[in-house]
Image (cartoon, rainbow, N blue to C red):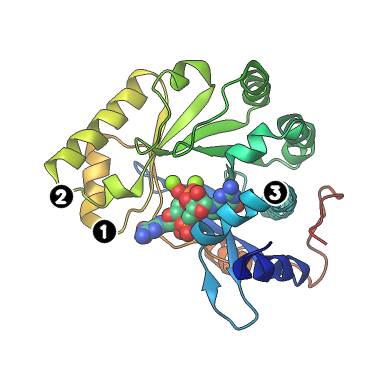
C-alpha cells in the first residue's frame, strides 16, 4: 500500500516533475570553479518544492531510485557535454549515489560502460557516496569502484564524520575526496569542538592524499576559516545555491541551447518516461 506521498511521487515521475539542479563548487585557494554537484529537485504541480531529504528515502524504499538515478546520469551527461562543447572544460559533475544503487548488481559496471561516452565528451564524473548509511563493502563493489577510479571517476565520501562508516573504509575504497558535512561548517566560529573536528578532517585528508570539500559555506567567516585550515574546495549559499540548468548557463556565461535539442544528446536508453 503506497503512502499519499509515494502516490504523489509516482505521478510526479509520469509528469516529469523531477528536475536536476547543479550547485557550483570552487577551489578555495584560487576561487576557480572546480565542478558542480547534481541535486534532485521536485517541484509539484501546485508549485511547491519537496526536499530530496523527504523524497529520496521514498525513491529508495520503492526501488524507483535505480530508474531515477539512471535518468539523472543521462541528464548530467548531456548537460556536461554541452558545457564542454562551449568551452567550460574544467567542470566536473558530482552525482550522489544511494547505497541501494551500489547494491544493485550491474549498476557500477553500467556506470563504467557509460564513462567512455561521458569522457569522450571531455566531461569529468565524480560519485558521492553518503557516509550516513553503511556502505556495501563486498569484493564486487570494491573491485567495481577501483575500475571506476582507474577510469578517472573520482569518489567522494559525503557527509564525512556524521555516519557509521569506519575510517578503515578510506584504506579499502579508492576515495579521492572527503566532504566535510555542513553541520560542522555551520559551527565554525561558534564551537571550538567543531573547529577541531574540521581541522582534523582536513589534516587527515592532506596526510593521506585526499582533497577536502566543505559543504554548506554560508558566511565570509566560515570561508576564511576553511581557507586558513587549508580546505581545498567549497560549496554553499555564500557562493551559490543549486541552480537550474538555465541559471547555471548564465552563471557560466554560456549560450542557451535551442529548445528541444538538449536531452539525451550523449547516450539514450534511460529516459524517465
Ligand atoms: P548532500 O549530497 O549532502 O547535498 C548537500 C545539501 O546541502 C543539498 O541539499 C544542498 O542544497 C544543501 N546546501 C548546499 N549549500 C548549502 C548551504 O550553504 N546551506 C544549507 N543550509 N544547505 C546547503 P538538498 O539538495 O536538499 O539535498 C539533500 C540530500 O538529498 C543530499 O545531501 C543527498 O544526500 C540527497 N540527494 C539529493 N539529490 C540526490 C540524488 O540525485 N541522488 C541521491 N541518491 N541522493 C540525492
Ligand atoms: Mg552530496
Ligand atoms: Mg553532504
Query: Local crowd at mark 3 within 10 Å, few (<14), some, or many (≥20)?
Result: few
Left or right of 216? Residue 198 is: left
Quarter of the image for residue 118 reads top right
Question: What is the number of the mark on residue 63?
Answer: 3
Label 3: element kind: loop
Q: Nearer the viewer, residue 122 or 17?
A: 17
Query: Local crowd at mark 2 within 10 Å, few (<14), some, or many (≥20)?
Result: few
Left or right of 130? Residue 221 is: left
Question: What is the number of the mark on residue 189?
Answer: 2
Query: Disc 3, ligand 1: is the CB inside 8 Å?
Result: no
In which quadrant is the C terminus drawn? Answer: bottom right
Question: What is the number of the mark on residue 135?
Answer: none
Question: What is the number of the mark on residue 219?
Answer: 1
List x then y, in percent, for residue 138: 61, 19
Q: Nearer the viewer, residue 32 or 273?
A: 273
List x then y, in percent, for residue 126: 58, 38
List x then y, in percent, for residue 148: 66, 26
- Is residue 11 visible from the viewing direction of this image? yes
Q: Is residue 168 above or below residue 105?
A: above
- Cα distance between the residues tagged 2 and 3: 41 Å
- Mark 2 and mark 1 residues within 8 Å of each other at the beta carbon: yes
Left or right of 241? Residue 199 is: left
- Is residue 24 visible from the viewing direction of this image? no
Amino acid at each position: 500500500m503506497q503512502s499519499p506521498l509515494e502516490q504523489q511521487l509516482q505521478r510526479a515521475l509520469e509528469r516529469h516533475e523531477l528536475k536536476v539542479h547543479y550547485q557550483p563548487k570552487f577551489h578555495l585557494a584560487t576561487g576557480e570553479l572546480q565542478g558542480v554537484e547534481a541535486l534532485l529537485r521536485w517541484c509539484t504541480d501546485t508549485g511547491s518544492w519537496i526536499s530530496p531529504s523527504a523524497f529520496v528515502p521514498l525513491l529508495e524504499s520503492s526501488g524507483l531510485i535505480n530508474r531515477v538515478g539512471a535518468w539523472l546520469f543521462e541528464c548530467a551527461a548531456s548537460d556536461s557535454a554541452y558545457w564542454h562543447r562551449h568551452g567550460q572544460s574544467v567542470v566536473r559533475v558530482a552525482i550522489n549515489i544511494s547505497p541501494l544503487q551500489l547494491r544493485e548488481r550491474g549498476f557500477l559496471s553500467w556506470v563504467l560502460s557509460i564513462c567512455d561516452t561521458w569522457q569522450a565528451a571531455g566531461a569529468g564524473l565524480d560519485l558521492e557516496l553518503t557516509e550516513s548509511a553503511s556502505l556495501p563493502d563486498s569484493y564486487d563493489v570494491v573491485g567495481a569502484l577501483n575500475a571506476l577510479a582507474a577510469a578517472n571517476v573520482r569518489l567522494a565520501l559525503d557527509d564525512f564524520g556524521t555516519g557509521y562508516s569506519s575510517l578503515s573504509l578510506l584504506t579499502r575504497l579508492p576515495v579521492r575526496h572527503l566532504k566535510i558535512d555542513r553541520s560542522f561548517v555551520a559551527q565554525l566560529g561558534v564551537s571550538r569542538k567543531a573547529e577541531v573536528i574540521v581541522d582534523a578532517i582536513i589534516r587527515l585528508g592532506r596526510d593521506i592524499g585526499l582533497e577536502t570539500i566543505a559543504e554548506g559555506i554560508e558566511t565570509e567567516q566560515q570561508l576564511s576559516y576553511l581557507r586558513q585550515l587549508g580546505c581545498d574546495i567549497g560549496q554553499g549559499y555564500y557562493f551559490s545555491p543549486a541552480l537550474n540548468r538555465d541559471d547555471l548557463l548564465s552563471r557560466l556565461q554560456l549560450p542557451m541551447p535551442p529548445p528541444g535539442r538538449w536531452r539525451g544528446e550523449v547516450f539514450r536508453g534511460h529516459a524517465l518516461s
